[in-house]
Amino acid sequence: MGQQPALALRWRVTDAKSAVPHDSGKVAVVGHTPQSNGEVLDLGFLVCIDTNCVRGGWLTALDTSTGQLWQADRGGRLRTKPSRAG
């Protein structure tokens, strides 16, 4: 993270069309790019958990060790999604 430019860390949005895996092979978990459909964007090597809560979507939590997702909306509805690792 320390080697990333401040502009990239704070303001660059996730572009699924041009995203590429990191050289390390690690999965990047990011936010700050609302997914208007309320679904997590999972490219395998990049996971965006900004599911547009501020505009009526879901607030999402991800257990990075298991891939388990938990979501809640403004109305208090809850939903879970199974581990992406299976």
Image (cartoon, rainbow, N blue to C red):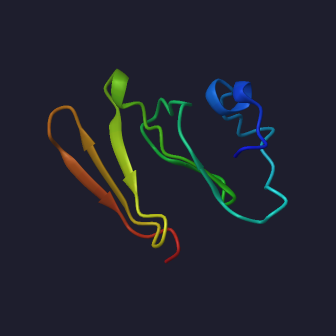
Q: Residue 69 location in percent, x, y? A: 38, 59
Above or below for 83 versus 32: below
**Which residue corresponds to the image point at 80% horizontal and 64% vertical from the top-left?**
24
Above-or-below relation of 86 to 63: below
Give coordinates of residue 82: x percent, y percent.
38, 68
For this orientation, the residue located farthest to the left is 76
Extreme-front residue of the structure: 2
At a point 49% along the width and 77% down the height, the residue shown is: 86
Q: Quadrant of residue 23?
A: bottom right
Q: Nearer the viewer, residue 28 or 34?
A: 28
Residue 49: image location, x then y, percent = 48, 45
**Residue 47 image point, x, y percent:** 58, 51
Q: Is residue 51 left or right of residue 26?
A: left
Q: Which residue does the image show at 47% across and 67% down from the upper left?
A: 67
Q: Is residue 58 left or right of residue 63?
A: left
Of 75 and 60, the residue lying toward us: 60
* Residue found at x 62% / y 27%: 10
Q: Between residues 58 and 61, which one lies in front from this camera angle?
A: 61
From what the image shows, is residue 30 above or below residue 84?
above
Q: Residue furthest right?
A: 23
Q: Position of 55 compared to 49: left or right?
A: left
**Residue 66 in the figure: left or right of residue 28:** left
How many numbered circles are shown?
A: 0
Q: Quadrant of residue 55?
A: top left
In this picture, is 21 found above or below 49? below
